[in-house]
Image (cartoon, helix red, strand yellow):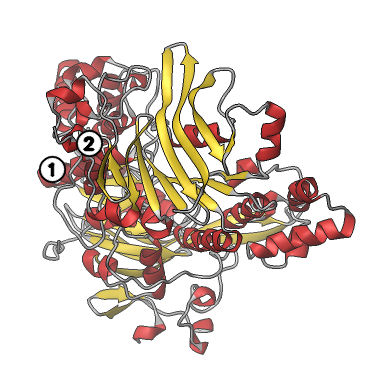
C-alpha cells in the first residue's frame, strides 16, 4: 500500500466535564492514503467528529485534551506541534467541509471576499490575479457565472451552491487531506447526488486523501473505499467497503446494517438494536457494546476486546473472533 | 404490501391548493404568489399509510398542515369520512381535530420541558374529553404501555428521556384521543440510526393493533417505502407520481421519481444501478416553469413538455404526470 497521507495511532481525546471525564476518542487508529476515501461511520456521540477535530487540534478548549497517541501527516508528527505551526497546517494541508454551509460562511462578507482570503494566504496573490484565481476555484466547483457570483452574498445562494463555495475554499491550497463532516446532510437528495459527484471529481484531480464522516451508509457504499465503524469512541470494525457490507464481522455493524430499511427488501419487521448508545462519561467496563449486544459473553463485560484481523484488510474488535 | 380493497377512503383531497402571497422587491411593493401546493389530489384508506416524498420546498409540509387544519386551502377540498372539512360545524370540526393527530420531527422541541410526561400525554384528554382524573390516569398508563415505556415515566420530565423515548412520548400523546389518522412529519430523522428501527417498528405495530392510518412524510426514501402502502411523490407543489408503494419505489416511472430514488443511494453492492444525477436545482415556487414543472431538469424533456402541463394519468399500475406515458 502507498505511504499514508495521514496515519493515526492509538489516539485518545478526553473531555473533562462536570459529569466526569468523557472519553470521546478512546484509542483510535487508522490511516488514509493518497486518493483514498475513508468513511467514518457511527451514531451521534460515537466520536467521529471529535476524531477529526483532533487531527487539526480544534477540539473544544480548555475542556478537551489529546491524552495520548500519534497523528502523522506525510510522516510529520502533529501532536507535538505548536499552535503557530498548526495554523499553517489547517486549511493548507488539512481542509474541512462542515455540515451547514450557512454557518461556515460569514453572512456579511461577499463570496468573493471569503474565497479570496485563503487564496491570498496560501498563494500570496494580489489584485487581478487573485480575483482570477478565486473565480477559477468557483468554476472548479461548477458554479455558473463565477465572476458574477464573487459579488454575491451567502444569503443570495441556495444551500447546494453555498456548500460548493465551501468546497472551493477547502481546495484553495489544495490540501493533502480533506475532511468532509456530513457535508450533504443539509442538502436535498438530488443536490446531494450532484455534490458527491463533485467531491469525487475534486479528489481525483488533486489526489486528495479524504475522510468522509456520515451516518448514511448509502453514501458510504457510493463514494468510500474503506470504512471505519465507530461506537462509543472506538473503532469497532474497519475494512474495505464491499467486504464490510457483504460480510460484516462485528455484531454492532451487523445490527446496524440490519436495522436499516432497504428498497426492494420488504420486511415486516426491522431488526432493531435494543437500548441506546452509552453515556460516554459512564462507559461500561469491557466492550462498550456489550449491554446491547445479542451475542454478549461473560468476557465482554470485563475486558475490552482488541482489533482482531478477520479478513484481508478487515479487523473487528470483538471477542467472538478470539480463537483461543 | 398491497392496499386493502378500496372501501370508502378515510381522507380524500381533491384539487387541494394553497397559495401564499409574498411581497417582492426592495420596498415590498411588488407582490407574488408562492404556489406551495397546487391542485393536489390523494386518498388515504383506513388503516393504511400514505408516504409523501419530495425535496424541501415541494409542498409536503404545507400539505400536512392543510390536512391538520393548520392552514386553510386556497382552493379544493379535504373530505374526511365522506364529509367536507370546510363545511363542518363546530361539533364536526371538533371530531375532525380529535381524529387527526400529529407527531413531529424533533421530540426535543415538541414536548414542554416543564410538564411531567403524564401531564403531557393527558393534555389532549383534558381538553377534549370530560373524563375524571382517575380515568385519565388509567388512560395515560395504558398509552405508556402501548408505546413501550414503563409506568413510572408518567412522573418524570422529558429531559430524563433519550430522543427515541421522547418520540415514544410524542406518539403516546398523539394516540391519546384514539385518532383515525396520524400525520408523521419526519418522525425518525432526528433520531440516532440504531434507534430509528425501534420507532419504525413501533409505528407499524401500532397501526396493526389500532387500525390507525398514517400520512408519513420523510426524506429517507427507504424508510418511506418500508412504512407505506401507497406513495405520492411531490415536485414543486404537485404530485408527479402516486401509486402502490412497491410499484413507485422499485419501478418508478416519472423521470423525477427515478432520479430521486436513484439519488437515495441504496446500500446495494451488487446491483448495477443506473447513475442518474439530475442537473440544476429546484426552481423557485414563486415562478414555476411553464408546462411540466420538471422539464428544465428532465433528461427526457420533449418540446411539448415546455408548453403543455401533463395530467396525472393511469400508467403501468400507478398514476404518473408525464408526457412520456401518454
The circle on residue B175 is 2
Task: Evaluate whether residue B243 shows in this view.
Answer: no
From this view, report whether residue B255 is shown above or below residue B136: below
Nearest to the observer: residue A44 or residue A321: A321
Q: Quadrant of the C terminus of chain B?
A: bottom left
Q: Quadrant of residue B170?
A: top left
> What element does badge 2 sit on?
helix
The one of A64 and B76 positioned closer to us in this rendering? A64
How packed mark 2 is, by other alpha carbons closer than 10 Å (few <14, some 14-19, many 20 or more), is many
Residue at numbered disc 1: B210
Q: Quadrant of residue A310?
A: top left
Residue nearest the viewer, comparing A4 with B222: A4
**Residue drawn at (11%, 65%), measured in percent from left and top?**
B5
Residue at 20 percent across and 26 percent down: it is A291
Local packing at callout 1 (Cα closer than 10 Å; few below 14, some 14-19, many 20+) is some
Q: Are marks 1 and 2 in contact (CB under 8 Å)?
A: yes
Q: Is residue A173 left or right of residue A10?
A: right
Residue A299 drawn above or below residue A97? above
Horizontal arrangement in the rendering, residue A214 relative to residue A146 (left or right): left
Q: Mark 1 falls on what kind of element?
A: helix
Q: Residue A114 appears at what percent x and percent y? A: 74, 47
The disc, 1 or 2, on the residue closer to the chain's N-terminal end is 2
Q: Residue at x 48, y 36 (%)?
A: A8
Q: Position of residue B320 (x, y in %)?
A: 34, 75
Q: In 3D space, how far apart are the residues under numbered discs 1 and 2 (Cα atoms)?
A: 10 Å
Are labels 1 and 2 on one chain? yes
**Tag shown at residue B135:** none
Which quadrant holds the N terminus of chain B? bottom left
Q: Quadrant of residue B136?
A: top left
Amino acid at each position: 500500500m502507498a505511504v499514508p497521507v495521514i496515519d493515526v495511532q492509538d489516539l485518545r481525546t478526553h473531555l473533562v466535564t462536570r459529569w466526569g471525564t468523557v472519553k470521546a476518542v478512546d484509542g483510535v487508529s487508522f490511516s488514509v492514503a493518497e486518493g483514498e476515501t475513508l468513511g467514518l461511520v457511527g451514531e451521534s456521540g460515537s466520536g467521529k467528529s471529535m476524531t477529526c477535530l483532533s487531527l487539526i487540534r480544534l477540539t473544544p478548549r480548555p475542556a478537551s485534551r489529546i491524552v495520548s497517541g500519534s497523528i502523522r501527516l506525510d510522516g510529520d508528527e502533529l501532536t507535538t506541534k505548536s499552535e503557530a505551526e498548526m495554523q499553517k497546517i489547517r486549511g493548507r494541508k488539512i481542509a474541512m467541509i462542515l455540515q451547514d454551509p450557512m454557518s461556515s460562511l460569514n453572512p456579511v462578507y461577499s463570496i468573493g471576499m471569503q474565497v479570496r482570503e485563503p487564496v491570498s494566504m496560501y498563494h500570496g496573490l494580489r489584485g487581478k490575479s487573485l480575483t482570477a484565481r478565486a473565480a477559477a476555484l468557483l468554476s472548479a466547483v461548477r458554479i455558473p457565472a463565477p465572476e458574477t457570483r464573487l459579488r454575491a452574498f451567502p444569503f443570495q445562494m441556495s444551500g447546494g451552491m453555498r456548500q460548493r463555495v465551501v468546497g472551493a475554499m477547502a481546495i484553495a491550497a489544495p490540501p493533502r487531506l480533506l475532511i468532509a463532516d456530513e457535508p450533504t446532510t443539509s442538502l436535498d437528495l438530488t443536490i446531494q447526488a450532484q455534490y458527491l459527484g463533485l467531491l469525487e471529481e475534486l479528489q481525483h484531480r488533486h489526489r486528495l486523501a479524504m475522510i468522509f464522516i456520515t451516518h448514511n451508509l448509502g453514501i458510504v457504499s457510493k463514494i468510500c473505499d474503506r470504512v471505519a465503524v465507530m461506537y462509543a469512541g472506538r473503532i469497532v470494525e474497519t475494512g474495505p467497503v464491499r467486504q464490510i457490507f457483504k460480510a460484516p464481522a462485528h455484531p454492532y455493524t451487523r445490527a446496524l446494517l440490519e436495522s436499516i430499511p432497504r428498497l426492494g427488501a420488504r420486511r415486516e419487521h426491522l431488526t432493531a438494536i435494543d437500548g441506546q448508545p452509552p453515556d460516554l462519561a459512564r462507559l461500561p467496563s469491557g466492550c462498550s457494546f456489550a449491554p446491547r449486544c445479542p451475542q454478549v459473553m461473560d468476557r465482554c463485560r470485563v475486558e475490552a476486546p482488541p482489533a482482531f484481523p478477520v479478513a484481508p484488510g478487515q479487523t473487528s474488535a470483538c471477542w467472538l473472533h478470539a480463537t483461543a | 404490501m398491497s392496499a386493502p380493497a378500496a372501501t370508502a377512503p378515510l381522507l380524500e383531497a381533491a384539487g387541494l391548493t394553497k397559495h401564499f402571497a409574498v411581497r417582492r422587491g426592495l420596498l415590498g411593493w411588488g407582490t407574488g404568489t408562492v404556489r406551495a401546493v397546487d391542485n393536489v389530489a390523494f386518498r388515504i384508506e383506513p388503516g393504511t399509510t400514505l408516504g409523501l416524498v419530495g425535496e424541501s420546498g415541494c409542498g409536503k409540509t404545507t400539505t400536512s398542515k392543510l390536512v391538520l387544519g393548520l392552514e386553510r386551502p386556497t382552493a379544493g377540498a379535504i373530505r374526511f369520512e365522506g364529509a367536507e372539512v370546510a363545511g363542518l360545524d363546530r361539533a364536526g370540526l371538533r371530531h375532525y381535530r380529535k381524529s387527526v393527530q400529529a407527531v413531529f420531527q424533533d421530540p426535543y422541541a415538541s414536548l414542554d420541558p416543564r410538564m411531567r410526561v403524564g401531564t403531557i400525554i393527558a393534555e389532549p384528554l383534558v381538553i377534549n374529553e370530560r373524563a375524571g382524573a382517575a380515568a385519565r390516569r388509567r388512560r395515560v398508563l395504558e398509552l405508556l404501555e402501548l408505546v413501550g415505556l414503563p409506568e413510572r415515566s408518567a412522573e418524570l420530565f422529558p429531559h430524563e428521556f433519550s430522543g427515541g423515548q421522547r418520540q415514544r412520548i410524542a406518539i403516546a400523546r398523539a394516540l391519546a384521543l384514539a385518532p383515525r389518522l396520524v400525520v408523521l412529519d419526519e418522525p425518525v430523522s432526528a433520531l440516532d440510526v440504531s434507534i430509528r428501527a425501534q420507532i419504525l417498528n413501533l409505528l407499524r405495530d401500532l397501526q396493526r393493533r389500532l387500525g390507525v392510518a398514517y400520512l408519513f412524510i420523510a426524506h429517507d426514501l427507504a424508510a418511506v417505502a418500508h412504512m407505506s402502502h401507497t406513495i405520492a411523490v411531490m415536485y414543486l407543489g404537485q404530485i408527479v407520481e402516486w401509486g402502490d408503494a412497491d410499484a413507485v419505489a422499485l419501478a418508478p416511472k416519472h423521470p423525477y421519481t427515478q432520479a430521486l430514488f436513484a439519488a437515495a443511494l441504496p446500500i446495494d453492492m451488487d446491483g448495477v444501478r443506473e447513475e442518474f444525477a439530475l442537473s440544476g436545482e429546484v426552481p423557485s415556487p414563486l415562478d414555476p416553469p411553464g408546462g411540466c414543472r420538471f422539464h428544465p431538469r428532465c433528461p427526457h424533456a420533449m418540446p411539448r413538455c415546455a408548453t403543455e402541463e401533463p395530467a396525472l394519468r393511469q400508467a403501468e399500475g400507478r398514476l404518473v404526470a408525464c408526457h412520456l406515458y401518454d
